[in-house]
Amino acid sequence: MYTVILFLHVLSAVSSIGPFFVLVPLIERMNAASEDVLHAHIATFRSAVRLVKHAGHVLVTTGVLLIWQSYWQWTTPWIVMTLVIMFGSIVFLARAFKPVLRKFEEPSADRQTLIRKLQRSLWIYILILLAMLWLMVAKPELW
């Protein structure tokens, strides 16, 4: 059973990070897109964020089950740091994308500014996710 949970954990980690790499070239296309195409790109962006959010739920659930079934303790440094970063990433995810994507619907929205915000947030979130991935894979002794 541990192996199945571990597989689901890894699969959900890939599903939590992968869609954001697809969004990198999409953001580049948003600059020159017509209004109809821009709305399609925004819908794609929203879907990717939704997919990542749900994959994150599976990731957390399987992570809890893995710790429960293994010899790792909740006070292990890499687990503590992963949890700290994860809670920060939840707050960041809630504020980074949805409000900006909503602003695209406003008639007075500055498209270039919003695209730059999305791009910046996207790279920050990718780095946050990669930091958590590193902690889970390397399992460093931090203290």
Image (cartoon, helix red, strand yellow):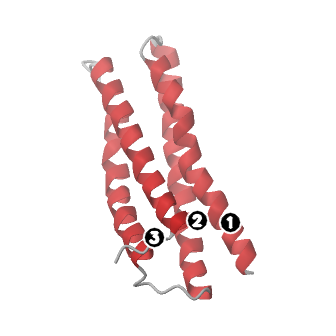
Q: Nearer the viewer, residue 50 or 88?
A: 88
Q: Earlier in the sequence, mark 3 or mark 2?
A: 2
Residue flagged by tag 1: what amino acid is it?
Leu
Q: Earlier in the sequence, mark 2 or mark 1?
A: 1
Residue 8 - label: 1
Asked whether the viewer can see residue 105, the reply is no
Label 2 neighbourhood size at 10 Å, few (<14), some (14-19), many (20+)? some
Q: Nearer the viewer, mark 1 or mark 3?
A: 3
- Residue 30 position, x and y percent, is 45, 19
Pointer 3: what residue? 140
Label 1 neighbourhood size at 10 Å, few (<14), some (14-19), many (20+)? some
Q: Earlier in the sequence, mark 1 or mark 3?
A: 1
Q: Nearer the viewer, residue 10 or 76?
A: 76
Quadrant of image for the N terminus = bottom right
Asked whether the viewer can see residue 139, the reply is yes
- Residue 121 position, x and y percent, is 35, 39
* Disc 3 to disc 2, C-alpha distance: 24 Å
Q: Nearer the viewer, residue 97 or 2?
A: 2
Pointer 2: what residue? 58
* Disc 1 to disc 3, C-alpha distance: 23 Å
Q: Which quadrant of the view contains residue 99?
A: top left
Quadrant of image for the C terminus = bottom left
